[in-house]
Amino acid sequence: MAKAARTLAIASYDDIFTPDATKAGNSLESVLEIPLGELFPFENHPFQVRDDEAMQETAESVREYGVLVPAIARPRAEGGYELIAGHRRKRASELAGKETMPVLVRDMDDDAATIIMVDSNLQRETLLPSERAFAYRMKLDAIKHQGARTDLTSSQDGNKSKLSVEIVAEQAGESKNQIFRYIRLTELVPDLLDMVDADKIALTPAVEVSFLTRTEQAELLDVMDMYEATPSLSQAQSMKKLSQSGELTREKMEAFLSEPKKEPDKVTLQGSKIKQFFPPGYTPQQMESIILKLLAGWHKKYQQAEAQ
C-alpha cells in the first residue's frame, strides 16, 4: 500500500532551487514526501529520461544520500501529482529502490508550469536537437499565452515589449534565428528527426527538409535508404523550392541523392607568397601553426555571424 505523503515544513526552498522568475509570494511552502507511484510525468514532456551511465551515478547518489533537491509538482484533478521538474530524480529514486521522494507542491497554470519545466531542463549539458526543438516550441507557446508580443514584423525599441521569441532566445543564450531553426525540426517526421539526433543529418539541411510535406518526407526517407545518402544543404534547399511549387517528385529526389559527391577543392599555399608575412627564420611548422590559429579565429566569428 502506498505510503501517505509526509509533510516537511521548509522555509524559502525557492531560494535553493527555483529560478527567481518562478518564486511564489509565500515564503513558507510545504515539501511533501510523495510516493513515487503518485507522481506522473508532465504532459508531452520533451526531455528523455535515459538509463545511461549518468543515471546510474545519480541513482547511486540517491541510494546513499537520498534526493537532496526536492522536485516540483502540481496537484492533478484526477488525483496524484504532475511532475514539473524532477523526472530524472524520480527515475533515479526508482532505480535506488526508494518508495518516496521530496517534492515541492505548488498550484500553477499550464503556461507557468511549462516554462519552469523547460527552464529546469535546458541547463543540462547533453541535450538532443529534438529535445531542444520541442522544448523551445513549448516555451514559446507558453510565453505567447502569457501575453508577450508575437508580431515579428514590427520594429523594436526600448519602450516596447520584447517578442516571445526574443525572450526564449535571450534566456537560452541563442539567437532568434537559431530558436526558429530548432523549432522547425518539430515539423520533421519521427524517423528524420531521429536521424538528426543521431547526427546522421546536419541541422541546417534538416531545417530545409522540414518544409517538405510529410508525404514527401516519407518518400525522401525511402530514397535516402535506397542510395544510402543524405541531402546536402544545397540539395535540401532545392527540394524545398520544388516542394513549394508543387514540382517535387520521387524521380527528382533520386536525381539529387544519386549525384556523385564532389571532392573538396584543394588549396595550396606557396611558401614564396606567405613568407613575406612572417619574420625571417620562421620554419614551415611555425608558419602553419600561426595560420591555423588565425583560421580558427575567423571560423568562430563566421559561425557567430551565421547564427544571427
Image (cartoon, helix red, strand yellow):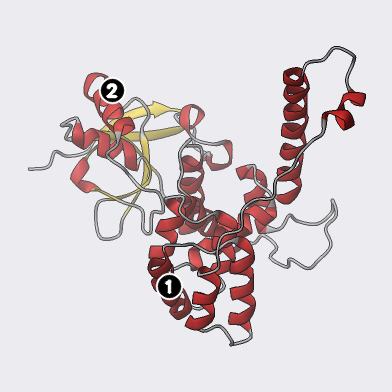
Q: Hey, what amino acid is under mark 2?
A: Ser
Q: Quadrant of residue 77?
A: bottom left
Q: Give the residue number, with chain letter if any, for mark 2.
A: 61
Residue 253 point in image, percent of width and height: 51, 76
Q: Give the residue number, with chain letter if any, for mark 1.
A: 223
Q: Quadrant of residue 241?
A: bottom right
| Residue 145 visible | no
Secondary structure of the residue carrying tag 1 is helix
Q: Hey, what amino acid is under mark 1?
A: Val
In-image side of 138 versus 32 (left or right): right
Circle 2 packing at 10 Å, graded few (<14), some (14-19), many (20+), is: some
Residue at the spot 26% in from the left edge and 26% down from the top edge: 62
| Residue 230 visible | yes
**For discs 2 and 1, the disc positioned in front in the rendered view:** 1
Residue 286 point in image, percent of width and height: 75, 18
Chain-order first, disc 2 or disc 1? 2
Residue at the spot 38% in from the left edge and 27% down from the top edge: 10
| Residue reaching furthest to the left | 1
Q: 53 or 266, which is in the foreground?
A: 266
Residue at the spot 77% in from the left edge and 28% down from the top edge: 291
| Residue reaching furthest to the top | 281
In-image side of 46 versus 179 (left or right): left
Q: 128 or 192, which is in the foreground?
A: 192
Residue 276 point in image, percent of width and height: 92, 25
In this view, 217 is above or below 230: below
